[in-house]
Image: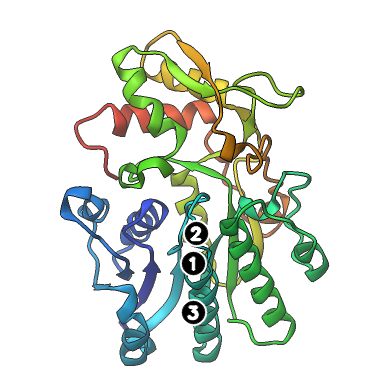
Amino acid sequence: MSRRLVLVTGGAGFIGSNIVAELAADPSLDIAVCDRLRGAALGKWRNLAKHPIADFVSPEDLPSWLDAGGRDVEAIIHMGAISSTTEPDADKIVNTNFCLSRDLFDWSARHGRRFIYASSAATYGDGSGFDDDPSLAALSALRPLNAYGWSKALFDLHAIRQVGRGAAPHQWAGLKFFNVYGPNEGHKGAMRSVVAKIWPDVASGAPVKLFRSYREAYPDGGQRRDFIYVRDIAKVVAWLFHRGDVSGLFNLGSGKARSFHELATAVFHAAGREPRIEFIDMPAGLRDQYQYFTEARIQRLGDAGYLDPFASLEDGVTDYVTNFLAGPDPYR
C-alpha cells in the first residue's frame, strides 16, 4: 500500500489538533504537523500527545520540507493562522494569514494536491448577512471589522480568483468557522472560548461575568453568536478529506444563534449548579469591533452532501464540561 500523507498546519493548535485526532483514527493515514509548540509549560504539545504523527515541521522549515517530500503529500489541511482579533501587528497578520495561505494554495494547485483551509465568520464584519456566496461580487462587498477578518477575506478572494482562472487545486474547500469551543484550547489564553474562560468560576461556585450590551435591541448577555463544537468541525474536515470531490466556500457553524446568557446557563447546568450571572462593562476599545449577532447559513454544506447533525449548544457544552473540563485530563 502506498503512503497516504496528510499535512495539517497549525496541527498542535485548538482546531488543528482536533482534526489530527479525527484523522489519526484512520490507520491508513500518516499525519504530518506543522506548528510551533513554544514553551513546554504552555502544554500545547499535550494537544498531540494521544495521537501518532509521522512528522513535525516548524513553519520556517515548511517550504524546504515540501520541496523535499511534497510528492508524498495527498492533502494540505491549513489551520495555521494568527487567530487573535486584537493582534496589533497587521504585517504579522497578513504575512501569516494571507501570504502563507496563498503560497500553500498555489503550491497545491501546481503539484496536484488537495487543499482545505480555515476561513472565518469574521469576514462578515458587522453581521449584516451570512450568505456563503462564493461570487467575487459578494466576497468583495464584505467589510470585516478588524485586520484578522480582512486577512481571511483577502485569501477567500484569492482562492475564488484562482478558481476562475483554472489555477486551483482539484479539491479546495474554505470553511468559515463561527464561534468554536471544545477541548484542546487551554493554551489560547485570552482567545479561549467563553466556555473555557468561565469554567473556573462555574466550578468554584462564583458568579460568571458577561458583557453589558450597548445596543437597544440586545439585553445584557443577550448578544447572540453561532456556537459550534470543535468535534463537529473536525468531522466536517474529515468528511471533506475522505470525499475528495467536494470543493467550495462553506459556512461552518451550528446554524442557530444562541445568546451568551444561554451559553453560560448551559455551563452551569452541565456542572449541576444554578446559574449566577453578573454583567460588566465592555472595554471601550472593543465596542466598535464587536459582533452582536452571528448565525451561519449552512444550506450550501448540506447541498454538498454533509448531512450529519451538529451538536446542540447544551449537548456540546455538556460533553466538553463532563469529559474534559471537569475531568482529570482536559485533552482530546
- At 77% from the left edge and 60% from the top edge, which residue is drawn? 133
Q: Residue furthest top?
A: 274
Secondary structure of residue under mark 1 = helix
- At 27% from the left edge and 43% from the top edge, which residue is drawn? 331
Crowding near the residue tagged with mark 1, few <14, some 14–19, many ≥20 C-alpha atoms within 10 Å:
many
Which residue is under mark 1? 241
Name which residue type carries label 1.
Answer: Phe
Secondary structure of residue under mark 3 = helix
Residue 194 at what x, y percent from top left?
A: 46, 33
- Foreground of the two, 261 or 317: 261
Q: Is residue 261 visible?
A: yes
Residue 310 at what x, y percent from top left?
A: 55, 40
User: Which dot marks residue 237?
Assistant: 2
**Inter-mark Cα distance, 1 to 3:** 17 Å
Position of 125 relative to 310 (above/below)? below
Q: Quadrant of residue 40?
A: bottom left
Crowding near the residue tagged with mark 3, few <14, some 14–19, many ≥20 C-alpha atoms within 10 Å:
some
Residue 28 at what x, y percent from top left?
A: 32, 70
- At 24% from the left edge and 72% from the top edge, which residue is drawn? 54
- Foreground of the two, 11 or 246: 11
Q: Quadrant of residue 158?
A: bottom right
Q: Residue furthest left?
A: 40
Which residue is under mark 3? 104
- Foreground of the two, 261 or 55: 261
**Of pointers 1 and 3, the one earlier in the residue sequence:** 3
Name which residue type carries label 2.
Answer: Val
Secondary structure of residue under mark 2 = helix
